[in-house]
Amino acid sequence: MNQFPTLIEYLLLHHDHVVIPSLGTFIAQQQEARRNEEEEAFLPPYRSVRFNVELSHDDGMLLSAICNLFDINQQEAQRLLGTWIDEFQQMLEDEGYVEFGAIGVFSTTARGDMMFAPKESGVTTPEYYGLDAFHMSEVERETKPKTVPLAATMEADEREITIRINRRIANWAVAACAAILLFMVFNTPMPEQSQQQMRSSLKELIVPQHEATNLPTQPKAESPAPVARPAEKNIQKAQEPQQEWCVVMASAIPTEKAQEYAETLTKRGFLSARVVKKGQMVRVVVGHYKSEEAANEGARDVRQRDSEYQGAWVMSL
């Protein structure tokens, strides 16, 4: 039975269709490379496979391949093919699904109809060997705000206007005023009382406010507490949900097939398998990761489990 899917895979590498008598026909279709705008990902070209149960007329190609492979006559090849088909149908009836190599998965509906879900990696061809999906965001041109060095700048909002003066210019102005007062005190004849008043004014101008502890000061009116706008922004940022990453096992498939494939993955040990719908795209994903690095590590582990999962890739939810 294991030789049956392998032979079909080999024939699909060289032909666009392979007929299995009394079951149906595998049809390979060329898919061009494309870009997924929603996920900002470039997807490589591949060959997808679908199965048509209505096309079951024997064209002799499969029997001829069996004869050449095992070096037997056509009658013996027909008996061997019949044995394979019987085993396949019995397994599908007992288990409810059959993994057909790296091509896809057969399953049955509640009414007993046979369904086929192709695997995400598609049919491997030598032309596409090594090609994988990669992510690239659109590059936005960075614009730097223009800065004008001004001695004094003005900021305004809806309620108040604040004028900011350059500290170095203010210090220079204070020093200039102090020099003028010194010149007037020591070079201009005036009464002693006037000189005392001038020295007092000069002391208030030169001595910094935080050092003049002995000078009488008037109590300042309490100003209303400023609105804590940055704190509100911090609270809003803290309430934002954290980004989650996952590993995509299958995409661009109908919702019903996606649900069935998720159940199949659960039976194989992927307990986090689930169906995710993002826009019009339906996908089957596994894993819950808090960072892209952890998701990439999980994707590598998934690919190492089986050749079927070689097309698994990382996506953010």
Image (cartoon, rainbow, N blue to C red):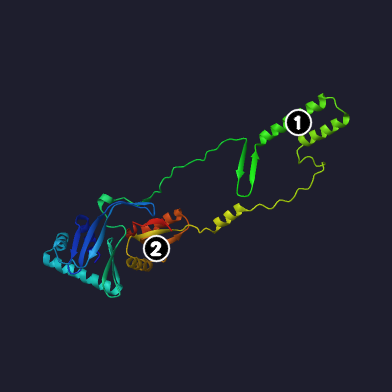
Please name the amino acid that badge 2 sits on: Val
Q: Residue at x 41, y 56 (%)?
A: 315
In the drawing, does residue 12 fall left or right of residue 159? Answer: left
Question: Which residue is pictured at 70% across the width and 32% down the height?
Answer: 173
Q: Do we see residue 48 in this rendering?
A: yes
Rate crowding at label 2 as few (under 14), some (14 to 19) or many (20 or more) other CA atoms within 10 Å.
some
Mark 1 neighbour density, 10 Å: few (under 14) some (14–19) many (20 or more)? some
Q: Amino acid at mark 1?
A: Ala
Q: Nearer the viewer, mark 1 or mark 2?
A: 1
Q: Position of residue 33 (x, y in %)?
A: 30, 51
Where does the C terminus fall, quadrant-wise?
A: bottom left
- Sequence-earlier tag: 1 or 2: 1
Q: Secondary structure at mark 2?
A: strand
Secondary structure type for disc 1: helix
Which residue in the structure is indicated by mark 2? 276
Residue drawn at point x = 39 percent, y = 62 percent: 277
Residue 112 lies, with reference to residue 197, above or below; the image says: below
Residue wearing tag 1: 178
Rendering coords of residue 221 (x, y %) = 75, 50
Quarter of the image for residue 69 reads bottom left
How far separated are the C-alphas under marks 1 and 2? 75 Å
